[in-house]
Image (cartoon, grey):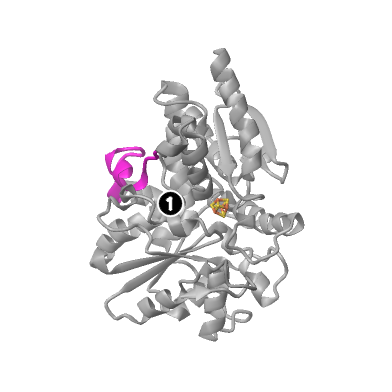
Amino acid sequence: GQCSAHCPTGAIVEYDETVDVWNKLQDPDAYCVVQIAPAVRVAVGEAFGFPIGANLTGKIYASLRRMGFKAVFDTNFGADLTIIEEASEFKSRLLDGTGALPLITSCCPGWVDFMEKFHGDMIDHFSSCKSPHEMVGALSKTYYAHKMGIDPAKVFVVSVMPCTAKKSEIIRSKEMSSSGYQDVDVSLTTREFARMIKQSGIDFVSIPEEQPDHMLGAYTGAGTIFGATGGVMEAALRTAHYYVTGHDAPRVDFEMTRGLEGVKEGRLTVAGKEIRVAVAHGLANVEEVLEKVRAAREAGEEVPYHFIEVMACAGGCVGGGGQPYGATNELRSKRAAGLYQEDQAGLWRCSHHNPYIKQLYADFLGEIGGHEAHELLHTSYQVLPEYKR
Ligand code: SF4
């Protein structure tokens, strides 16, 4: 259905898919599974009077089970998996020259879309990794379905995202469907999810917390911080450090990537090699970073950066287009703080420590960056011809 609640003339409509999800939940032939993005857990509480940035993960899991989802996964697991694949891609490009540097992150569909239209010369720099919710979707219909003895054709994957661009990402190319099925069937925004909680009559304030289904739901602090600008870079550096040196960094906090400055730059030395990184959020800030890369390329100089993170929304996904309305920098900071607190308090802080990810590779995917991983977890991009530079 269409919802025009926020436009006085009804000319701008937000496509509301909550009815489609309720219908699937009633369908006896559908096996509905769900996942929530990092940034959702620290924002949905605003619709129920919780303090800004309160982390409500356990209540969200419980509510989703009450709604009738048969399995409750977490996109943070997918974020950990994205890091495993992307840090390995980074290590091969850095040490073995297997691809262009800087490596540029590709988990934000707002940015991917923008790059394909306006920065097609950067296509070789993009990480081939699918975004975290796509990875969880692909595994729900293969690994999970197989382990549970469910017909993958019946598995219906819903993702709850802080993002409106995710709604088009799920249908962007056939490449996203190498399991034979579309990875994610419906992507809801945080606002739609808050609406569903209200429609269901669940008492969200007092519902007791629950755990996720761990097979595709257990995660580390590195997965959690994906929801804030700089979080993907920090998570990737934790694991890239391990891949390059064989041991964890003495401190896994890389503060240079944090905060709301438009462009953040940093350098660190790993195994005697200097690694230069940049983080940009808000599409206007991306231009500055890409111009530096182009200038160095044209002058035949060394690359200014080895790794770049880009998020289309100011603040990253905590300030995403699907979040409760009226984001300010104060709100973005408080939501981000809710994510960094969880990272600090967690048992595991690096994606490569996630025991369920290790299990996944041992039982199903085989090698990191191997054939099966490429079939299910990676994708490709294309320059749209009318926009070629
Ligand atoms: Fe979506 Fe914005 Fe996050 Fe990009 S930064 S994935 S557009 S919410």
Compared with residue 149, is residue 387 higher up or lower down, i.e. above or below? above
Compared with residue 275, is residue 216 higher up or lower down, i.e. above or below? below
* Residue 327 on the magenta span: no
Q: Estimate the x, y position of residue 256 in percent, counting from the top left.
A: 69, 37
Identify the residue at image location x=62%, y=72%.
9
Q: Quadrant of residue 262?
A: top right
Identify the residue at image location x=59%, y=41%.
234
Q: Is residue 5 left or right of residue 28?
A: right
The residue tagged with tag 1: helix, strand or loop? helix
Depth check: give the residue in front, 277 or 117.
Answer: 117
Q: Estimate the x, y position of residue 186 in percent, counting from the top left.
A: 41, 65
Residue under label 1? 355
Depth check: give the residue in front, 15 or 87.
Answer: 15
Q: Estimate the x, y position of residue 20 in percent, counting from the top left.
A: 40, 75
Q: Is residue 209 left or right of residue 370?
A: right
Identify the residue at image location x=40%, y=50%.
357
Q: From where the camera sits, is residue 302 visible? A: no
Q: From where the camera sits, is residue 174 visible? A: yes
Q: Is residue 162 left or right of residue 335?
A: left
Q: Report the magenta residues as a range.
A: 363-382
Decide: few, some or many residues near mark 1? Use Cα within 10 Å; few <14, some 14-19, many ≥20. some
Q: Quadrant of residue 371?
A: top left
Mark 1 beta carbon near ligand 1 (under 8 Å): no
Identify the residue at image location x=59%, y=47%.
312
Q: Quadrant of residue 134?
A: bottom left
Residue at the farthest top position:
300
Q: Estimate the x, y position of residue 214 in percent, counting from the top left.
A: 42, 62
Depth check: give the residue in front, 188 or 94.
Answer: 188
Residue at the farthest bottom position:
201
Tag 1: amino acid:
Pro
* Residue 377 on the magenta span: yes
